[in-house]
Amino acid sequence: MNINSFCLFVAGLIINRIIGPTLAGILNFLNLIYSYCNHAYSPFQLSLSRDYPQLMGRNEKEKATLLYNNAYSLTIMTASVISIGLLVCSLFVQENKFLHYGFIALSIINLGRATNFFLVVAAQVTKNFHVLSTYYILIGLANLSIVTLFTYLYSFYGTIFALAFVQFTACIIFSINLNLTLTIKRAILNIKLLLRRGLPLQIFSFVFLNLRQVDRLLIIIFLDFTRLGYYGLTVTMINFAMLIPNSIWYVIYPEFMEMGAANKDNTEKIKGVAKHNTINSGAFIIFPLLLISLAVPLVINNALPAFQPSIAVAQILLFGLFFLSVYQMYYYVFILYEQLPRIIILASFCLLIDLILNYYFIKRGLGINGVALGTSVSFFLFCFATIVEGGKILRQKLAETAILLLKILFPFCYALAIFLLINKINLLEHSSLLNDIKSFLLASIICLFLYSPVLLYLNYKSKIITRLLKSIFR
C-alpha cells in the first residue's frame, strides 16, 4: 500500500506538470464528482466489512457467503446505474470537450473503481492479503507508467482514458482471484438489511468527505478551474502526507478495538489508552508534516513552476492536516460505544463552519489561501470537538480534557514556530535547483536538531517511532 501511495503521488506530480493548472482543475472536478458517486454503493462495502468477520467468527459460513455475494451484486448494479447517469451527463456538456470526454471516461472509471474498492474490502475480510498487496502494487505501477505515458503523448485525454483503462483492466484481473457470484434477486431482497447495517458509518463518511472537500466545491462555484488546479495539486501532496498518520492508526486501531471490546465497562483503562496514543501520535506526526512543508517550495519551484501559487496553500493545509491526524482515537471511542449519531452532528456543525469561513474568505479576496485557512480552522474545530465529546463518553473530567488539548497543541505550536523561524531568515528562498536542495537539507537539519528532544523522549516513552518503522517496512 505504501508503494501504491508513492507511485500515485509521483504520477500526480507528473500529470499536473504536463497538463497544467487549468486542465488539472478540470481533472480535480471530475475526481470530486466520482467521490460523491462512490458514496452510493459504499454502504454495501461497509456492511460487508462490519458483518462478514462476525458471521465467520460464529461459524455461519452460509450467511457470510450470501452477504459477500449480495454486497458484490448491489455494488455492481448501483455503479452501473451511476455510470449510465454519467454518460447521460456528458451529453449536456458537449460545448466543453474536456468535460464531455471527461464524463465519458469517468463512467468507465466509476464502474472499474467501484468494483475495485469492493474487491479490496472482500480481500481484506477473506484475508487474501497476497492478492490485496499485489493489487495495490500493480495499480500504483500502472498509474506511474501507463497513465503518465499516455498523458505525455495525449495530454488531458490521455490521462482520463488511461485511468479508465487501468481501472477497468484491474477489476477484471482482480475479480479472477476472488470467488464472486452475482445474486441479483437475493441481493435486492436483502438490500434493506445491508443499508441498515452500513448506513450509519456511510452517513458519517459522507459528512466527513464534505468536510475534506467542500473547499474545492466552493472554488469551482466562486473562482475557476485554474485556481482549482492550483489547489488540487496541494490535495495530491496532502493525500501523500496522510500516509504517515494512516500508518500509525493502521497499527493502533485493531489493538485498541480489541482491548476496548474486552474492557468496555472499564472506561478508565480505555480513557488512559486513548489519551496516551493521542498525545504521542500528535507529538510525532507534526514533525514529518513540518519537513514536508519545508520541501513544498523545493518541489513546486523546480518541478512544477506553473503551480507556484500552490506553495502557501499546501503549507497551510499541511499544518491543518495535523488536526485531522490526531482525532482518531476519540473517533474510535464513538464506534466502540456505538455513538455515531453524536459524531455525525459534530462533523455536520464543523462542515457548516467550514462553508461559512471559506465563503467569507473568498468574498474578502483571499482566494485559495483563504480557502486553505478556513479549511484548516474547520479541521482544528472538528479535532477538538471530537476529543471533547469523546471524552464525555469516557467520563473524562473537564480539567483532563483541557490538559490533553494543551499537550496536543504544544508540539504543533513548537513546530509552527520552527517553520516561521526558517521562513523569517529566508532560508528557503528560490534560486536554483542545487541551491534549493542545499537550503532544504540545511533547514531539515535545523528542524531535526530543534525537535529531536521531543522525538527522543517520545520514543523512549511509547516506542511509537519504532512501531511506525516496522509498519512501513514490514
Image (spheres, helix red, strand yellow):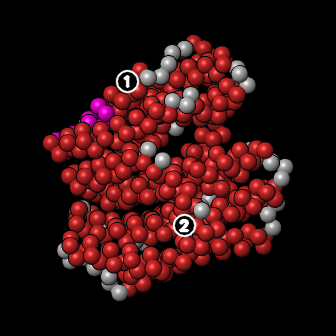
Range of residues picked out in magenta: 154-166
Q: Quadrant of residue 20?
A: bottom left
Q: Which residue is mark 2?
A: 284
The secondary structure type at the circle numbered 1 is helix
Residue 172, disc: 1
Q: Main secondary structure of the magenta part?
A: helix
Q: Disc 1 vs disc 2: Cβ atoms closer than 8 Å?
A: no
Residue 306 x, y percent position in the rendering:
22, 63
Residue 153 showing in the rendered view: yes
Q: Amino acid at mark 1?
A: Ile
Query: Where the N terminus falls, by quadrant?
Result: top left
Instruction: Mark 1 or mark 2: name the one nearer the start of the chain.
Output: 1
User: How many other residues sit within 10 Å of disc 1, few (<14), some (14-19) or many (≥20)?
Assistant: few
Q: Quadrant of residue 402?
A: bottom right
Toward the viewer: 372 or 414?
414
Residue occupying image coordinates x 60% and y 40%: 202
